[in-house]
């Protein structure tokens, strides 16, 4: 079996199962031949003789590629194995699982957000269509009013994150957009963040609205530097708040667990 690029190191090969090596080999062929989403994977690539493994191993390798979103299979007339495109949301869900039981800290996330979100804002400044601008305004309207319940408070905090997600959707730099979306997904998943988002804090909502209304004006005016500056201030304030609330929760937990 031809050893795929990146799997030639003996230590790497030892860690990979034969199934994974076979999946890598087929992936390499797809990349080398320049196949695109929707293209059929040539049948001659998918025979046990071609990849020099058993039918069972080949079948499992195809399952791996399908789970990864790289291929899809169709049965019946005109069926076969086809190249598929991986949706960013699917990729983010897989990456989320990487940190599910070893979650990063709030500082870890905001170390990146403070660098990337200002660039995201600058990237979209002057480049939004009217429908895109309207969708961002719709996000803001979801948390303009004072929440009446804890559930509404939580929904409004998530809507604030959706505002940033919407910005990422309209970013022309796909790597920047994906990374910003991934960091937002981590925030939504973290237990401590979920708890903080459920806490009533009218002042925080007003501060967030202030930043985002100013940001929209700068974006619409096409002022990239002002957009960058506003978002940077927003990120520093958001990090400060999240760290303060997390510290308060930690202190509260220690006080409750200490003997009376």
Image: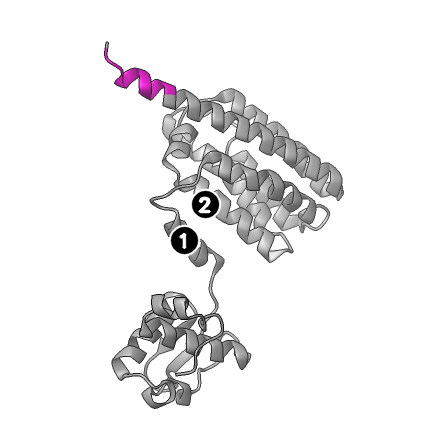
What label sits on residue 93 in the rendered view? 1
Instruction: State the residue at coordinates (39%, 80%).
Output: 81
Query: Please, is residue 41 above or below residue 159 in the view?
Result: below
Magenta span:
251-259
Distance of label 2 from label 1 (alpha carbons): 8 Å
10 Å crowding of disc 1: few (<14), some (14-19), many (20+): few
Taking the image as shown, residue 244 lies to the left or right of residue 124, namely left
> How far across and down, in percent of the image, does residue 87 sit?
47, 61
What kind of secondary structure does the magenta stretch mostly adopt?
helix
Q: Is residue 232 left or right of residue 44?
A: right
Under circle 1, the secondary element is helix
- Res. 185 mark: 2
Judged left or right of residue 254, residue 240 is: right
- The quarter of the picture where residue 221 lies is top right
Nearest to the observer: residue 39 or residue 21: 21
In this rendering, the answer to whether 199 lies above or below 171 is: above
Q: Residue at x 36, y 78 (%)?
A: 74
């Amino acid at each position: 079996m031809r050893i795929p690029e990146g799997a030639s190191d003996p230590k790497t090969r030892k860690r990979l199962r034969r199934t994974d090596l076979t999946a890598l080999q087929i992936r390499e062929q797809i990349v080398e031949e320049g196949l695109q989403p929707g293209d059929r994977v040539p049948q001659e690539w998918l025979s046990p003789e071609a990849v020099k493994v058993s039918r069972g191993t080949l079948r499992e390798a195809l399952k791996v590629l399908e789970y990864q979103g790289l291929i899809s299979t169709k049965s019946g007339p005109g069926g076969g194995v086809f190249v598929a495109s991986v949706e960013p949301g699917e990729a983010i869900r897989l990456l989320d699982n990487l940190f599910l039981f070893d979650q990063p800290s709030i500082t870890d996330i905001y170390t990146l957000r403070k660098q990337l979100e200002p660039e995201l804002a600058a990237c979209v400044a002057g480049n939004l269509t009217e429908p895109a601008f309207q969708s961002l305004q719709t996000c803001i309207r979801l948390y303009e009013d004072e929440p009446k319940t804890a559930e509404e408070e939580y929904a409004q905090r998530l809507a604030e994150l959706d505002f940033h997600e919407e910005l990422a959707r309209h970013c022309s730099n796909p790597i920047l957009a994906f990374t910003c979306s991934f960091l937002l997904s981590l925030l939504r998943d973290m237990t401590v963040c979920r708890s903080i988002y459920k806490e009533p804090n009218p002042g925080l909502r007003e501060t967030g609205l202030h930043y985002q209304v100013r940001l929209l004006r700068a974006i619409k005016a096409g002022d990239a530097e002002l957009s960058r500056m506003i978002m940077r201030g927003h990120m520093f304030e958001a990090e400060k708040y999240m760290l303060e609330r997390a510290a308060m929760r930690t202190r509260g937990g220690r006080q409750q667990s200490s003997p009376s």
